[in-house]
Image (cartoon, grey):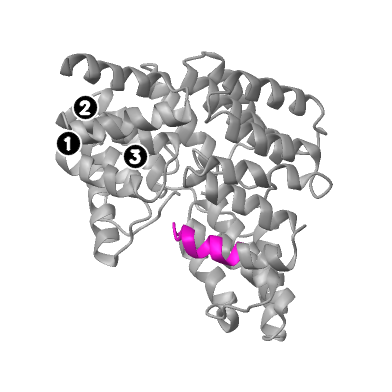
């Protein structure tokens, strides 16, 4: 998923976290405690929403103005990412309605349209728009960044990395090096990637909090995969720079769960129940702690996933696979979803849930897929390598 509102964007594992958090309607939940916080609503008086209202007015005053329509669509996209609310992706698409189906749309529309499409996991359509935009403007930094992100999500690391050096002179150097390091960390070059990121962060202006949050979060993910306890320090630094970074909240929550610290997950994500990815971490933490609220959280997730399937929405198959395996205890359903997800996106988190489901079902084919990916890419991921090795040894 692309991180919006910052350059560069990143996939949610990667960058584009979260990350994609989904908000859907669910069965009603009745709290047992009147003081329990169910949701923190966005501050409609914030700078972000004041800017949004201004852009809405400007676009309404000039319905055919491409620049105003793109500015509004981009603003909606930023709200979608910062609030974990996919409704704003729909609003962003509506802002581009006059050009949404036009293959020869203006370049700015192509790039914003691609950004929206990739958030909905329509990666091939997004790449087609980006390729068309870059054929017109080879030095368009945003198009290069988004294309590198989408290619990374698809596991096409060679093509993705080729776009990063093209950013020199188009974006601050930190973002160029972060683009390169993020991809190198997935190809057996974690140590070099960490060194590059740390050097680049040391030169980042203090005012660039978005860049610092992104770089520290990326360092946290790399450390987590390598089994390095420094992960927590990096996640905390990322959240100090951007406390509302939903992607980092999820990644830090995963690190805490992996390290037997479920009790620390509850206050970390407990106020974001409307965001599916964070509610999943909360439910798993509550289950690990044997708290009675776990049943209600899992029931809410079950209803949301059912509603998504009824709409034909397949954006969060990875989260549903994890829910089925760790929350619902249905390993066969988890494997089916993990395989469907792997056919679309191939981030480290996608590989991990595939490996876990393959172990749970003793599926030799899925196990082979995991081992082949590790061998092909050189990905350093301690948890996944352990799973692959365990089943490989058991099969001998």
Residue at x 46% of width, y 64% of height = 87
**Which is more N-terminal, label 1 or label 2?**
1
Q: Nearer the viewer, mark 3 or mark 2?
A: 2
Left or right: residue 149 compared with residue 266: right
The residue singled out by tag 3 in the image is: 280
Q: Is residue 363 left or right of residue 342?
A: left
Q: Position of residue 19 (x, y in %)?
A: 49, 44
Question: Does the magenta portion include 127?
Answer: yes
Give the magenta part as a residue range. Answer: 120-130
Query: Residues under labels 3 and 1: Cα distance?
Result: 17 Å
Q: For residue 257: magenta? A: no
N-terminal of the pair, mark 3 or mark 1, is 3
Magenta stretch: helix, strand or loop mostly: helix
Instruction: Say which quarter of the image contains residue 312.
Output: bottom left
Whether residue 269 is situated above or below residue 199 in the rendered picture: below
Kindly report which numbered mark, 2 or 1, lies closer to the viewer in this rendering. Answer: 2
Q: Residues within 10 Å of mark 1 (few under 14, many from 20)?
A: many
**Mark 2 or mark 3, which is nearer the start of the sequence?**
3
Q: Residue at x 82, y 28 (%)?
A: 203
147 shown above or below 105: above
Tell me the residue that label 1 is attached to: 331
């Amino acid at each position: 998923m692309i991180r919006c509102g910052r350059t560069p964007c990143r996939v949610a594992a990667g960058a584009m976290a979260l990350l994609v958090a989904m908000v859907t309607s669910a069965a009603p939940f009745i709290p047992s405690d009147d003081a329990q916080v169910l949701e923190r609503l966005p501050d409609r008086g914030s700078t972000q929403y004041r800017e949004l209202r201004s852009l809405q007015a400007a676009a309404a005053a000039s319905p055919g103005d491409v620049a105003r329509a793109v500015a509004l669509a981009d603003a909606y996209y930023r709200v979608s990412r910062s609030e974990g609310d996919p409704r704003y992706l729909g609003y962003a698409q509506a802002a581009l309605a006059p050009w949404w189906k036009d293959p020869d749309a203006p370049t700015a529309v192509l790039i914003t349209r691609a950004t929206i499409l990739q958030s909905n996991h329509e990666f091939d359509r997004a790449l087609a728009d980006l390729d068309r935009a870059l054929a017109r403007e080879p030095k368009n930094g945003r198009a290069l960044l988004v294309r590198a992100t989408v290619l990374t999500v698809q596991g096409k690391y060679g093509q993705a990395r080729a776009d990063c050096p093209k950013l020199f002179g188009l974006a601050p150097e930190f973002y160029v090096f972060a683009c390169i390091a993020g991809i190198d960390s997935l190809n057996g070059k974690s140590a070099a990637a960490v060194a590059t990121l740390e050097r680049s962060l040391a030169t980042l202006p203090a005012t660039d909090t978005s860049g610092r949050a992104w770089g520290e979060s990326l360092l946290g993910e790399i450390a987590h995969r390598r089994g390095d306890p420094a992960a927590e320090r990096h996640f905390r630094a990322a959240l100090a720079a951007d406390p509302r970074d939903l992607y980092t909240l999820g990644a830090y929550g995963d690190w805490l769960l992996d390290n037997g610290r479920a009790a620390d997950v509850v206050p970390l994500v407990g106020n974001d129940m409307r965001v599916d990815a964070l509610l999943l971490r909360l439910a798993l933490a509550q289950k690990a702690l044997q708290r009675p609220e776990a049943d209600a959280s899992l029931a809410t997730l079950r209803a949301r996933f059912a509603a998504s399937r009824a709409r034909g929405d397949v954006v969060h198959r990875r989260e549903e696979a994890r829910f089925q395996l760790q929350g619902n205890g249905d390993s066969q359903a988890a494997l089916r979803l993990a395989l469907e997800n792997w056919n679309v996106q191939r981030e480290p988190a996608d590989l991990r849930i595939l490996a876990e489901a393959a172990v749970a079902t003793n599926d030799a084919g899925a196990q082979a897929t995991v081992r082949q990916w590790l061998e092909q890419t050189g990905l350093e991921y301690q948890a996944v390598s352990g799973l692959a090795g365990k089943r490989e040894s058991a099969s001998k």
